[in-house]
Image: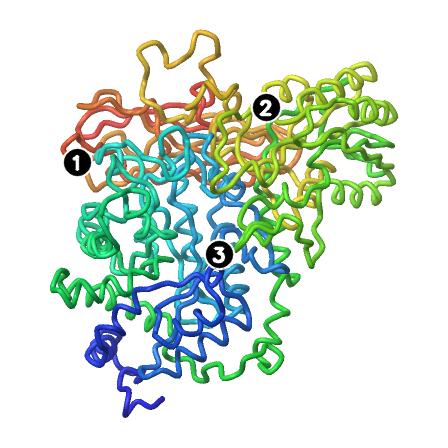
Amino acid sequence: MTTTSRPWLDSSLPVTERVKLLMSAMTREEKVAQMVQISYSVVSEGDADNWARLGAGSFLHVLGNNARRLQRLATENRLGIPVIFGIDAIHGHGIHNGATIFPTQLALAASWNTSLAEKMGEVTAREVCAEGLHWTFSPVFCLGRDLRWGRIDETFGEDPFLAGKMGAAAVRGYQGKNPADADRIIACAKHYIAYGESTGGRDSYDSSVSMRTIRDIFLPPFVEAIKAGCFTFMAGYEPVDRLPCSANAKLLRGVLKEELGFDGFVVTDWSNVTSLLTRHSMGRDMKDVSKIAIDAGNDMIMTSPEFYEATLALLKDGLVDESRIDEAVTRILAIKFKVGLFDVKEKVKTLRIEDDPTARNAEAVFGCPEHLDASLDAARKSIVLLKNDVVDGIPALPICGISGKGRAVRTIAVIGPNADSVRAQFGDWTFFTHPVPHLDAVPTFRVTTMLDGIREAAKREDIRVLYDKGCDIFDPAKNTIKKACHLAAKADAVFVAVGDTLIQTGEGHDRANLALSGAQDELVEALKIVCAKKEIPLISILVNGKPLEFSRVTAASDAILETFNSGTLGGKATADIIFGLVNPSGRLPISFPRTTGQLPVYYNQIPGWHEGRYFDCEATPLFAFGEGLSYTTFRYDAIKLSSERARAGDTVEVLVTVTNAGNREGTETVQVYATDRVASIVTPVRELKGFAQVTLAAGETATVRIPLPVDTLSIVTPEEKTVLEPGEFEIQAGHDSRPGSLLMAVLTVE
């Protein structure tokens, strides 16, 4: 490849000029091929090779040597355009057996720590690059508001502000300051838009939301993605008010590209264009639906290979404007140039990893100590202490043995179906589930389960550990509970790990009933009887992909730790908290229901005529957004605004005085909410507008300053106009979203 015959290879030229030079050399066939993305998991090796020679713009779900072979074939064709390889690296490069598995997005959101999200992206990028891949279909900017939806674990929770900040940080981690660096990858903001709001929590079903609601609730996180420089967006599966996202020109071409100025490219979700024909019945043939997709503003078409011939036929018949094709391909090529795919000095010429020294050395990246440390740090800061009652005069947690710092015990019983379950701890989007389901896979690396972590920590404390599964996650039979209770009677403290497992969560695994499966409730209640008689604590460890019905577990437990899906070292992180080595600092990014029928329970609802409650259920959630305890206590003494009056464009500082009133250092997440006292539309009871973390020594007091841009108090009118209305706003700050946790000041907007 030379810059004489292929002038677009001259890296000294601006990207726009390089794209123009390449576009001028391309045939129609070569342009349309760039719009095609092929899934390696559903085609034969021979077909994949043919697509690479043809000039397919992208492949997904290709690993290792296969990616290297396809890249070699692609770069040897007439124009030498490199393939962009995509992968679902959702919480680490988990599809590679051996890579570092981070806590899921929902778990990570419980840290309320954007630097952790950025670090996760950075580590994941290194491991994806080591595979020779360039693009992750992450982060997810959807909101988890209907807990029946299977993909709650992939979200950053229920709140648009928190989701936007955490997701934008992940984008920065993936792409870095210079996305052309060898250890950075392309991020993809998904699923655009309102995908998680599908009717009944059924995945990919119709999201019957208005454009006003889209702009108010679901668009703001994606705006944060654009601000962070995210190069690609993915269009969701679902129809929005009956019009599929991949057919919605207003959302894709109008709002995203023209109004918000997004200059990357849009990729459809899996088989979206084919689905316009086979599922949504929006055309008579592939030509009809391909035209719809092109006109709507999709640029790259995932796993609908029929699009290629259909689009060539459309062009031949003059049924689609060729400028639409040029626009899409220009966007795709611009990203390939920006991330340096054309400027790799030495394209891969070998077929085997064994012949490539760079690839051989890259194997050392997967699960390296530095990356595992980052995963452990994320897990520690993501775990939420939800309950910690006093038992026999002492808090249930932490516990200790010879160290003498906490509840002294000599024997621990660890019980429960999720105490030693790697699949439950990992959650979705790992080698267990993708690119094809392989639930019996065996990790090629060491995973620290809850049982492993407790055993290792207990050994250091000279504490004996007893273990019994207690019951299966599905089996309703209770005949094993008696054995578990007999074991618990020998202990000084009992831990029980309950929740869900892999096939109960994730894409395509929506739930009509959030009740704990099998005999888990009965197991916990039986253990409580044993513990109460002995006056010893029962501590529940929740290992789950999303909030479930934990009312019975909560009532029976003296302490509760929410770990969600905590990744490779989740068991160690949990044990560090149990034994007091780490002070828990996680806060819930999502509200927990008392029962499935109570849904929705997200905190930022509009005020209800009858207080928004059912007559047979308390109005409040079991656990509220923002909740989380510590081994110390924090006191909020005062709230003050830097100015009590403001105008559009101003930023007001919220000053909050916080004191660590306990006896050990701890980290508090100060949360700022706003309520519009009078508005031209009905507004939520409160909305998160800012947060900050502060670490305080015992007895220390600090004033925490949190910026509040006044424009974030705007509303979206039914006419889809964003308006900052004058009036009074209650600015609240405190520990969580519950009214009793918040101090309040009034801001007047002029």
Quadrant where the C terminus sits is top left
Q: Amino acid at mark 2?
A: Phe
- Secondary element type, mark 1: loop
Quadrant where the N terminus sits is bottom left
Q: In the displayed image of the protein, which residue is found farthest to the bottom?
A: 4
- On the image, the x and y values in percent for residue 243 come to 24, 40
Task: Tell me which label, 3 or 1, sits earlier in the chain.
Answer: 3
Q: CA distance from mark 3 to mark 2?
A: 32 Å
- Residue drawn at (53%, 34%), measured in percent from left and top? 546
User: 645 left or right of 95?
Assistant: left
Disc 2 crowd, CA 10 A, few/some/many (<14, 14-19, 20+): many
Q: CA distance from mark 3 to mark 1?
A: 34 Å
- Secondary element type, mark 3: helix
Visible residue check, residue 161: no
Q: Amino acid at mark 3?
A: Gly
- Which label number is shown at residue 550? 2
- On the image, the x and y values in percent for residue 654 come to 36, 34
- Front one among 449 and 724: 449
- On the image, the x and y values in percent for residue 35 come to 30, 65
Query: In the image, is residue 49 above or below residue 486?
Result: below
Task: Tell me which label, 3 or 2, sits earlier in the chain.
Answer: 3
- Which label number is shown at residue 121? 3
Number of numbered callouts drawn: 3
Q: Is the C-beta separation of discs 3 and 2 under 8 Å?
A: no
- Which label number is shown at residue 720? 1
Q: Is the C-beta separation of discs 3 and 1 under 8 Å?
A: no
- Res 454 quadrant in image: top right
